[in-house]
Every structure is written in C-alpha cells, then in structure tokens.
Image: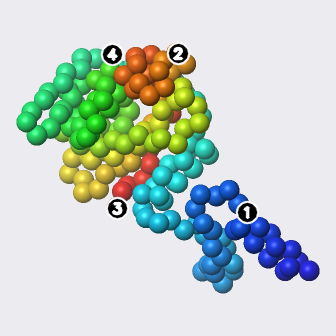
Amino acid sequence: MKIILYLIFIFSILTFGSCKYPLTIQKNYYDKLTLKREFANEGEHSAFMSRKVFRKKRHDESYPKYTGKIETIVSKDEMSILYDSVIIRIGVEDKRYLDIFTSGLIWPQMIGCWSSEGHGISITELYDLQKRHKRRFEFWVWQPNSMNPQSFLIELTNEGKFKQNNLEEFLKQAKVTFVYKGGIII
C-alpha cells in the first residue's frame, strides 16, 4: 500500500506540479530513488540556482554607498572605473548597468576586489522578480592571476516611486540590500 501511495505522490508531482523544470526519478549512489531536475542547458540551471539563493539565503541588510573618489576611464576597447586606487574593468554590453558602479552602490571591497590590479567584471540582470521595487543582478568577477571567475548575486532595493522599466531612475534612490558570494565558475 505504501508503494502505491508513493507512486501516486511522485506521479502527481511530475504531472501536476507547477515546476518550470521537469523532474525525473533516478537512482542515486546508494541505489535509492530520488527526484532530479532536468535543464535544457547550463543557463537554465544557473538561473534556477540564482533564484534558489535569493529564496533561501536572502535576508535584507543595508550596505552604505561608496564615499571615496570614483573616476570613469574610457578607452577604445573597454571601460574601467577607478575607486581611489582600485581599478575595475567593466565588460557590459548594456551601458546602462555602468551606473550601478559609477553611482557608488557597488564598490570593490563589496565584491572581493582589494588590490590595485585590474579586476574584470561581467554583469547580467535577473528578470524573475515579483516585486517592482527590487532588482537582482549576477556578477562574474575575474580576480588578477585567476583563471576562473567568482560569481556574486546582488539585490538592489528602491522603495520610492519610479517608472517600472527605467533603471536610471531606479538607481537614483536605490540601496544594496543583499550580497552573496557564489562559487567559482568552471
């Protein structure tokens, strides 16, 4: 009887679950049946894991803005931002994300950049929010002399009134409320 109830339960989860990613039953290392999510590609898996971090590990904090001197250095091939003595090279295709750094919301020590050597950063915005007063971003930070980047998840909050899709207006009164140092990207 327990086996039938177990199979009905598993079947109902697989069939009627509101899960975006399909579940399959597989045997694990100890020959026990387990549920495993299947993803079409690594991007889906990464987005799933990012949402999981925000859902399970997020708790609101308040981080101060950077108060030192911020200077933007534009060259033919790249954009760099100088925070007093620490240089960060920004590799963003969408230039509107540069305001996150030039406004002082994100500063080098917040994302593990301590030395004056150039650090490389790539940024993407995670669009799966339910609340319009929060925006979440994923950064990849390349440390000097490191082959692989470190991932960071950051949440910005703005309780004021602004147009929903206007990032520039959102950033004017935003504050950083969550920073998570993820794993090394291989």
Report the quarter where the N terminus lies.
bottom right
Residue at which label 1 appears = 16
Amino acid residing under circle 4: Thr
Question: Of the residues under marks 2 and 4, which one precedes in the sequence?
Answer: 4
Query: Residue shown at 43%/22% (left/top)?
Result: 170
How far apart in space, not on screen, are marks 2 and 4 (Cα)? 22 Å
Side (left or right) of 137 relative to 84: right
Q: Position of residue 126 (x, y in %)?
A: 45, 42
Report the residue marked by disc 4. 67
Could you say whether the residue bearing mark 4 is in a helix, strand or loop? loop
Question: How would you rate the neighbour count of disc 4 (Cα within 10 Å): few for under 14, some for 14-19, many for 20 or more?
Answer: few
Q: CA distance from mark 1 to mark 2?
A: 39 Å
Q: Which residue is mark 3?
A: 186
Q: For the residues carrying marks 3 and 2, which lies nearer the camera in this image?
A: 2
What whole-number distance in Å separates the C-alpha atoms at marks 3 and 4?
A: 34 Å
| Mark 3 surroundings within 10 Å by alpha-carbon count, few (fewer than 14), some (14 through 19), many (20 or more) | few
Closer to viewer: mark 1 or mark 2: 1
Tell me: residue 79, above or below residue 99. below
Disc assigned to residue 160: 2
Point out the tag, 1 or 2, that comes first from the N-terminus.
1
